[in-house]
Amino acid sequence: MRILVTGTAGFVGAALAQRLLARGEEVYGFDNHNDYYDPALKEARLAQFAGHPNYIHQRADLADAAAVDHAFATFKPQRVVNLAAQAGVRYSLQNPRAYVQSNLVGFVNILEACRHGNVEHLVYASSSSVYGANRKLPFAVEDAVDHPVSLYAASKKANELMAHTYSHLYGLPTTGLRFFTVYGPWGRPDMAPILFADRISRGEPIDVFNHGHHSRDFTYVDDIVEGVIRALDHPAEPDPAYDAEAPNPGTSNAPYRVYNIGNDQPVQLMRFIELLEQNFGRTVEKRLLPMQPGDVPDTWADVSALRRDVGYAPGTPIEQGVKKFAAWYRQYYGQR
């Protein structure tokens, strides 16, 4: 199968591309290699599979409609996974326009290309951040998500709305996956696991926001990739049980689905830090600080819909995942 994946120099995109290539798919990678974080890490991820005979790579920006159209016209993908986006909740407070270009303009370019290219199925990354100010746990796709607390979250909710219009108007099967705190080898250096690992490996104090009372549904990258592939292999279909008088936000009478993809086992942030300390063999000072703007205290994914529909079953305990992450960190960054 010909599968176009955007964001293949990114954390999840690189892991997904390798899994798809390993099972014999042809993969067309699309990534702009921006400098939001160290481009050398992106190049190192890509180097793991860039020479594969079934892999093609294009360096371009999703906001460049001509570049997107070129990729679709030359490769003619059967299915598409859109993982490229301007990520980061906190950065959206500093540079909001970057989110409009990548997450809104870029996404409509993908939708248009899928529409005109007769793509069988579009799977795209949404985010747990769409739950915003919600406090009912666990977060379920049936919940209303109308109170985002960052522009990043709003842009991801907008993606779900945009996808539904294309599913409704043009019959394009779309599946949105709300990712919950992905971690593991080759992770993003702007996220807590690497920020904490950097500090702990050097014996330096770490900043812990919300006075350490955060919990997160940390999900190991291999489990995320398995879920993405399972979703990709099950194109969205209209829900025969959909009731327009009592609508379910996760389904539709169009070929549209939205799912949570997480571990369904929230972990206290202090426990995650403790596991990192154990794996690095040292304990560091924790500077307890107030919660930051745009952040939320807790996340917890109800993944029952994804379990039911595609057999998703995350299987990496936090202890095992942190151990693998710490081993990779020491190897890649040369820290001992």
Image (cartoon, helix red, strand yellow):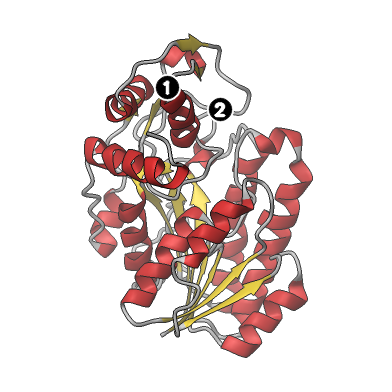
For the point 48% across and 30% down, which residue is it?
198
Task: Report the front residue among 294 and 33.
Answer: 33
The answer to whether residue 68 is seen in the rendering is yes
How many dots with numbers? 2
Q: Is residue 29 left or right of residue 336?
A: right
Quadrant into which the N terminus falls: bottom left
For the point 48% across and 25% down, which residue is it?
199
- Residue 61's x, y, as percent? 71, 65
Task: Report the front residue among 257 and 212.
Answer: 212
Which residue is under mark 2?
A: 295
Q: From the viewer's perspective, is residue 248 above or below residue 91?
A: below
Which residue is under mark 1?
A: 214
Task: Report the front residue among 118 and 288.
Answer: 288
Task: Report the front residue among 76 and 254.
Answer: 76
For the point 36% across and 24% down, which residue is it?
273
Q: From the viewer's perspective, is residue 33 above or below residue 132?
A: below
> Mark 2 packing: few (<14 Cα in 10 Å), some, or many (20+)?
some
- Residue 162's x, y, as percent? 62, 61
- Residue 53's x, y, as percent? 45, 85
Q: Which mark is residue 58?
A: none
- Residue 243's x, y, as percent? 41, 58
Amino acid type at mark 1:
His
Quadrant into which the C terminus falls: top left
Q: Are marks 1 and 2 in contact (CB under 8 Å)?
A: yes
Q: In the rendered image, which quarter is residue 258 located in?
A: bottom left
Q: CA distance from mark 1 to mark 2?
A: 10 Å
The answer to whether residue 124 is seen in the rendering is no
Amino acid type at mark 2:
Asp
> Mark 1 packing: few (<14 Cα in 10 Å), some, or many (20+)?
some
Give the mark nearer the N terminus: 1 vs 2. Answer: 1
Callout 2 secondary element:
loop
Q: Is residue 208 left or right of residue 228?
A: right
